Image (spheres, rainbow, N blue to C red):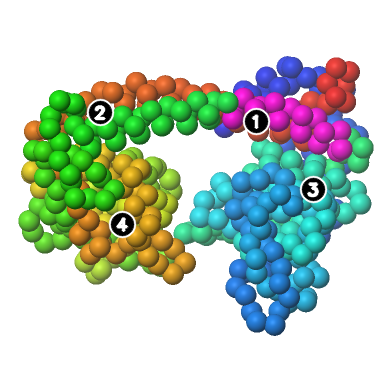
């Protein structure tokens, strides 16, 4: 938040402020330009929570749904988006059809920071409805939809929704939470000018972000190729090779073995097993940490969200404790079969039922297993064989029967040491580029916030 304020201060230095300000009625905002008004959203827009889901019912009219991900990943909703086919009642078609200027926001999410993410509808979309998990905000004649969408994304205004969101495993907003929020309301022509200004300025920032992301993609490709070569062919290119007998693997060094994955676990009880089925009522704010599928990245642990259970639940459900260094393999997409090492988090840990725990034997080096299960050929093959109704999934028994390459334990460690050294420089460079992207994104948010809350005058000479 401090860096965001610094970015906003920089924006204010670059652009001129308004001449006169007065105290704001908007929560989290001190002042607004003196000629601006402020209003609760219900006074300037109509808000509806969608009840249209992806289920199709015979006999109901076919429609297309603008869903959560369409809004989350797109600031502007246009016909170019591939909307999901579904059906809806005549009443739903009448209530939730999308018109130019509508603003759609996420009304619930697994993370409070993903609440009230906005997108503006840029054209009338025949047969496209606002889908479930979204709220449809239709501006009245005093509000420009593009300005309103930017306002939802600005610091200060969006903080109202973060405070209002309720939930434990999933956070949500009620209609009253949304319509009760305060918004600045500049004159209509000024709203349009602000929206135009932000479209231009954010487009420039987005180009810079895209260029940095392309560089990261190239570095990731280099990193992946380096790992794939080392874990499938070894470090010494002069050793003789043999057919592994594994479709996705091809040739491996002749002195390597190939074994079912479950045999890499140490002997004993629950050394190759699934995590535990933890339902919402068991979730607590502290205690024993629950590692979920979203924490499992390709070759790395991803920190996101903090959920726990208490000792009583651990005992009553006979949960399997996960220890630092255990290999965690996700049985769900995306991609199915990805793995990471359990980190040291300073607390006791368990994991969810769709994560397989592999407590590896002394003859198996955990980091090597993770590197081996990061091979894109393996992940593609897993995606092809996995099965499931609505979600790609592989069973633990099938996962355990999958054969993988197994070098001698000393060579496994040599490969791990080599890859750790070789990837460190790549990872450091990627980290620096990600920091640059983060700074640009903070600048982008600060610029939006400064413009829609009147910290800068975009119509001043030399700005608009």
How far is the residue under mark 4 from the one under mark 1?
36 Å
The secondary structure that dominates the magenta segment is helix
Sequence order check, earlier mark of 3 and 1 = 3
Judge by depth and name the residue closer to the eye, 338 or 252.
252
Sooner in the amino-acid sequence: mark 1 or mark 2: 1
Where is residue 272? Give x, y as percent: 18, 58
Q: Which residues are magenta?
A: 191-210
| Local crowd size for mark 1, using a 10 Å CA cut-off: few (<14), some (14–19), many (≥20) | some
- For mark 3, what is the residue? 122
Disc 4 or 1, which lies upstream in sequence?
A: 1
Earlier along the polypeptide chain: callout 4 or callout 2?
4
Asked if the stretch drawn in magenta spans residue 192, the answer is: yes
Residue that appears at 18% across and 26% down: 237
Horizontal and vertical percent for residue 231? 23, 36
Between disc 3 and disc 4, whose residue precedes?
3
Q: Is residue 21 above or below residue 70?
A: above
Instruction: Identify the disc placed on residue 172.
Output: none
């Amino acid at each position: 938040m401090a860096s965001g304020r610094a970015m906003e201060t920089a924006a204010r230095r670059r652009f001129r402020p308004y001449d006169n300000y007065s105290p704001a009625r908007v929560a989290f905002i001190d002042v607004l330009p003196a000629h601006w008004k402020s209003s609760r959203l219900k006074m300037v827009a109509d808000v509806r929570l969608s009840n249209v889901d992806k289920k199709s019912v015979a006999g109901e009219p076919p429609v297309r749904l603008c869903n959560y991900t369409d809004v989350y990943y797109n600031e502007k909703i246009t016909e170019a988006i591939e909307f999901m086919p579904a059906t809806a009642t005549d009443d739903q078609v009448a209530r939730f059809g999308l018109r130019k200027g509508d603003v759609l926001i996420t009304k619930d999410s697994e993370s409070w920071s993903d609440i009230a993410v906005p997108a503006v509808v840029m054209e009338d979309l025949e047969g496209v409805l606002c889908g479930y998990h979204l709220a449809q905000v239709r501006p009245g004649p005093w509000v420009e939809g593009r300005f309103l969408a930017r306002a939802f994304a600005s610091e200060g205004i969006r903080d109202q929704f973060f405070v209002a969101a309720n939930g434990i495993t999933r956070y949500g907003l009620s209609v009253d939470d949304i319509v009760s929020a305060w918004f600045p309301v500049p004159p209509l022509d000024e709203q349009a000018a602000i929206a135009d200004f932000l479209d231009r300025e954010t487009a420039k920032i987005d180009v810079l972000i895209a260029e940095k992301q392309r560089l990261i993609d190239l570095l990731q490709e280099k990193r992946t190729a380096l790992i794939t070569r080392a874990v499938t062919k070894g470090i010494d290119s002069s050793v003789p090779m043999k057919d592994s007998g594994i479709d996705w693997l091809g040739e491996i060094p002749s002195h390597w073995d190939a074994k079912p994955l479950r045999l890499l676990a140490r002997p004993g009880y629950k050394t190759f097993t699934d995590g535990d089925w933890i339902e919402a009522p068991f979730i607590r704010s502290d205690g024993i940490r629950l590692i979920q599928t979203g924490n499992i990245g390709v070759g790395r642990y991803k920190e996101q969200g903090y959920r726990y259970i208490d000792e009583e639940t651990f005992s009553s459900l006979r949960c399997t404790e996960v220890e630092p260094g255990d290999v965690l393999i996700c049985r769900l997409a995306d991609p199915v079969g990805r793995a990471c090492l359990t980190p040291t988090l300073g607390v006791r840990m368990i994991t969810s039922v769709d994560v397989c725990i592999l407590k590896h034997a002394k003859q198996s080096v955990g980091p090597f297993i993770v590197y081996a299960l990061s091979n894109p050929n393996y992940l593609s093959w897993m995606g092809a064989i996995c099965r499931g109704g609505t979600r790609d999934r592989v069973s633990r028994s099938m996962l355990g029967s999958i054969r993988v390459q197994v070098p001698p334990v000393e060579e496994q460690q040599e490969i791990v040491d080599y890859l750790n050294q070789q990837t460190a420089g790549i990872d450091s460079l990627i980290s620096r580029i990600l920091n640059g992207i983060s700074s640009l994104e903070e600048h982008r948010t600060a610029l939006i916030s400064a413009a829609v809350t009147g910290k800068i005058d975009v119509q001043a000479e030399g700005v608009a």
